[in-house]
Amino acid sequence: LMASFANATDLSGLTTPTTLIWGRHDKATPPAVAEAASRRHGWPLHVIEDCADDPPVEQPAALVRTLRAALAAHALAAAGFGGEIVGRDHRRYDELRAVFNGMIDRRPALLARCASARDVSTAVRVAREHGMPVTVYAGGHNVTGAAVRDDALTIDLRPLKAVEIDGRVCRAGAGLTWGELDAATQAHGLAVTGGRISTTGVGGLAVG
């Protein structure tokens, strides 16, 4: 996993905040090793005095989730993902993860805000390769909050709002709401059977 962030012999490329947690009585790897690593890389060192090599404050499951999200974000960028990749440290993260039902409070690992159909397929592939659950955010109107899930990769379709009308055929982006679609069709004297609520996503209701 470390090799995915930086060269194994040069960890200067590791920008994730890192703290070394060490047991004072670790016989396999004495604290002197941690002290040397702390000096070399500038990482803070937290030594737990009353334990050996299994500090109780470690959270391996959380670490794995964090690494998986970081690796997935790196893989999306490397694959030429053209949209915006939103992680938990992004300034709009809380805004973008919110759904219509205000009682839902879930924290996806990443939101992949797709700019094209290719971005959607790239996000699906990356999620599969990294073992991440997937949710799809079209309008976020579903009362159960299905658009978001804890530690998932959310494929965010909201930027896909293109709409084309040719005669009586409408090609609608999956991120449109029914209100936005209605406005476009009404300009041509047309209407489409859809949801009763204008903020419902076209993608979710059409598929659902």
Image (cartoon, helix red, strand yellow):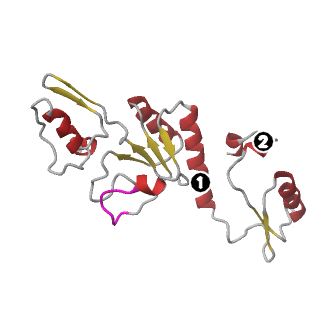
Work out whether residue 133 can be spotted: yes
How far across and how far down the image is residue 34, in percent?
A: 84, 60
Q: In this view, does 181 lie above or below 49?
A: above
For the point 86% across and 52% down, the residue is 40
Does 206 sit above or below residue 98? above
- Secondary element at image label 2: loop
The image shows residue 18 at horizontal and vertical percentages of: 72, 56
Q: In this view, does 8 lie to the left or right of 205?
A: right
Q: Is residue 101 magenta?
A: yes
Secondary structure beneath dot 1 equals: helix
Please tell me whether residue 185 is drawn above or below residue 31 in the rendered image: above
Which residue corresponds to mark 1?
66
Q: Is residue 1 left or right of residue 107?
A: right
Which amino acid, mark 2? Ala
Magenta span contains residue 16: no
The residue lying at 38 percent from left, 57 percent from top is 98
Q: What stretch is highlighted in magenta?
A: 98-104
Q: How crowded is mark 1: few (under 14 residues within 10 Å), some or many (20 or more)?
A: some
The residue indicated by pointer 2 is: 8
